[in-house]
Image (cartoon, helix red, strand yellow):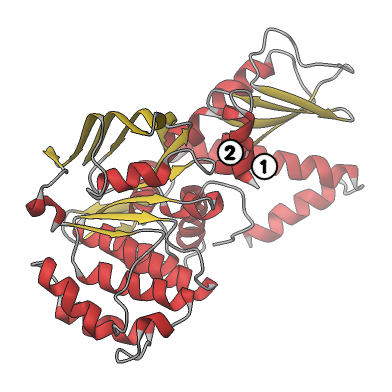
Amino acid sequence: MNYRDSRPIYEQIKDGLRKLIVTGAMAPDEKLPSVRALATQLSINPNTIQRAYNELEGEGYIYSVPGKGSFASGNTGADEARKAELLSQVRELLAELRYLGVSNAELAALVKEEQA
Amino acid sequence: MIEVKDLVKRFDGFAALDGATISVPAGSVYGLVGPNGAGKSTLIRHLTGIYRQDTGTVRMGGEDVWENTALKARVAAIPDDWYYFLQSTVRDMMRFYRGFYPRFSMERYEALKDVFRIEEKRMIRRLSKGMQKQVAFWLALCCMPDYLILDEPVDGLDPVMRRQVWSLVLGDVAQRGTTVLVSSHNLRELEDVCDHVGIMDHGKVLLERSLAQLQDTTVKLQVVFREDREVPPPEIPVLHASRIGRVHTLIMRMSAQEAEARLAAYDPLLVDAVPLTLEEIFIYELGGVDYAVKDIVL
């Protein structure tokens, strides 16, 4: 968590967890820290953390088992809103890269490189 | 659940509280803010049963607070001007608290010894101000309260201790569903720990909302229009607008999606939604209402 970050805390929590799941730092079906553990560790309101968890569940990144806790989901392809958001970010980055004189061929090469 | 309705309290004709109404849902952390003299501490003293209201109701969990010993056994409070007996040690005060709070937990008392690291045989009045406050937290948490009322609780605590006590309090909220009401001037800190906020001024509550609601319904947008404009289009309802160069900064009372959709009609070069901090929300929401309110966000 970054205290200088002006975004709402629950969004920071969401982004942090999402990053862990997407990069594979958190394996599918791995248990997330409990709301209580996170609340005491970060000194953050447990209801705020619960809200972040609920939204992540709605977006399909995690699933919860009553009485057991929340777990990372395996597939995260379902989230159309997030897809659109990321694509618009890529577009912004592309605009800046073009401004700096990076050619389309170079960009295409980059995409290929990432695939491999 | 804490419910205060139309609370009025006069001192020699001066209305310190002038129809204050708050409602704190069970298991939430409620931040009470407002300028000095707004009536925060007076309201808190009604919640702890020290003052008796002139008119209005003060209820916790559906019961009136005044002279209700059974209820008050479940309420722990840390006032801004705490009191310890002359010559008393931490252990003496613990015995005193234990006599009043039937649920006082010795197990917790022992566990918190490691956290606060204050020699329990030392005289409390010889301790520093910050350490005396730590003792207040130590004793209050041992009471296993259902309601925790804190008046400027972390003033005088060092940064490590601040996080330590918040972590203990929030752990209790998560585990036991404790309802917490906290008055503070530190909005940055409240943003982390609270889920509901109420702002007071002149003995009244001006605004009371959940933090999520506040943040979802107010948005700050940075916009660059294609053509050079002095002011944003008049059809767009803005709370506040400012301009640096070609970049307009607009504060709007709606969700980010809705605001972006409305601005898209003008085909702007750039629209960037920036979330507002609690401090900014207060400045913009209340800046026009009362100047005194502005002063709290220093």
State which quadrant residue B293 falls in.
top right
Label 1 environment density (alpha carbons within 10 Å; few <14, some 14–19, many ≥20): few
Q: Residue furthest right?
A: A101
Say which of B47 and A67 sits in front. Answer: B47
CB atoms of marks 2 and 1 within 8 Å:
yes
**Residue at 60% in and 39% down:** B276
**Residue at 65% in and 37% down:** A88
Q: Provide the residue designation for mark 2.
A: A85
Q: Quadrant of the N terminus of chain B?
A: top left
Q: Is residue B153 above or below residue B190?
A: below
Task: Residue B113: give x, y in percent of width and height.
Answer: 30, 85
Label 2 environment density (alpha carbons within 10 Å; few <14, some 14–19, many ≥20): few
Secondary structure at badge 1 equals helix
Task: Residue A9: give x, y in percent of width and height.
Answer: 50, 51
Answer yes or no: is residue B277 visible: no
State which quadrant residue B251 falls in.
top right
Q: Amino acid at mark 2?
A: Glu
Say which of B15 and B163 sits in front. Answer: B15
Secondary structure at badge 2 equals helix
- Cα separation, mark 2 vs mark 1, equals 6 Å
Please give the label number shown on residue A89. Answer: 1
Chain for numbered disc 1: A
Say which of B106 and B72 sits in front. Answer: B72
Q: Amino acid at mark 1?
A: Gln
Please give the label number shown on residue B229. Answer: none
Say which of B109 and B156 sits in front. Answer: B156
Question: In the picture provided, is B1 more to the left or to the right than B118?
Answer: left
Task: Residue A74: give x, y in percent of width and height.
Answer: 36, 57
State which quadrant residue B197 falls in.
top left
**Residue at 46% in and 69% down:** B163
Task: Residue B97: give x, y in percent of width and height.
Answer: 18, 71
